[in-house]
Amino acid sequence: MTQDRWADLPLRLASAIVLLLVFSASLYVERLGVLALGLVAVVAMQWELARMFGLSGRRLLAVTVVAAVGWLPMAVQPMILTQSLPLAAAAGLLPILLAAAFIAHNRMVYIGYGALLTLGMLSFWFLALTFGAIGIAILAAVVILSDIGGYIAGRLMGGPKFWPAISPKKTWSGTVAGWALAGLFGLYLMQHTGAWWSVPAAIAVAFGAQMGDIAESWVKRRMGVKDSSQLIPGHGGFLDRLDGFIGGAAAFGLITALFLS
């Protein structure tokens, strides 16, 4: 039984190392690399989401192409986000609305999660423009620490489930451990930057990441699928791996906008 708990760990670690190397390379190229990686990720997630809701063939291809065309200007000319937020939001939502016209069942579920995906990616773009690669690195660190805390503590300690009807594997012990690790990272940032709000902000971002994970789990259970795709061995698809980043970015973007204003 104990071995079964850790059976997927080697494959997960191998894929995680590859993902970390790709992400580190994008950070090395700085903002351009981060935005290019974000473009690839959001198009892949749009493809996975539309496919999860039953689209295939030409319709799936059309949604994917529209997603690429809609998000490409923000990668090439990212200032469009700050110059015209409504235009950027419309471009991000366009593939969602197109796919919704083709979807026969659970259309509102698709639109709702698609809106969350768009909000998370717009926040990702905003953070990249505001703080550059370092802002995205901080976001990634908080989300990864939250995920690591949840994975290890949940399997070692177990205990009551956090939300069993939606995410049967997530436990309160793992959830709190994720908050604790994020809070410690926030404390580290506070010591080096003097920003008193680093600790609560890090915990809020961790909570947003956990809610992003739960939201995607709920969508998958609603659609009767285990993984969004098999593009990332051991992790499922881009949505499975980045669902926490979506929720965390949305929380981080909101916090940043509040403090900057």
Image (cartoon, rainbow, N blue to C red):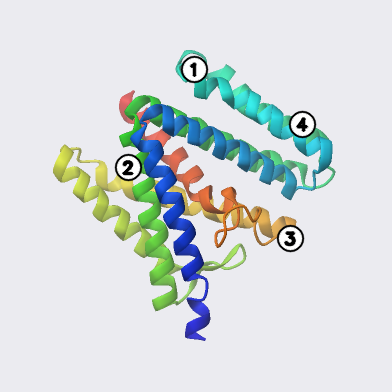
Q: CA distance from mark 2 to mark 3?
A: 34 Å
Give 149 or 202, whichever is nearer the viewer. Answer: 149
Amino acid on which disc 1 is placed: Gln
Amino acid on which disc 4 is placed: Ala
Which one is closest to the eye, mark 1 or mark 3?
Answer: 1
| Residue shown at the point (47%, 54%) measured from the top left | 210
From the image, tell me which residue sits under label 4.
62
Q: Mark 4 or 1 closer to N-term?
A: 4
| Residue 57 seen | yes
From the image, tell me which residue sits under label 3.
224
Amino acid on which disc 2 is placed: Ile
Q: CA distance from mark 2 to mark 4?
A: 35 Å
| Above or below, comparing residue 205 to residue 175 in the picture | above
Which one is closest to the eye, mark 2 or mark 1?
Answer: 1
Crowd band around label 3 with a 10 angstrom C-alpha radius: few (<14), some (14–19), many (20+): few
> Judging from the image, what secondary structure is the residue with disc 1 in?
loop
From the image, tell me which residue sits under label 1.
77
From the image, tell me which residue sits under label 2.
138
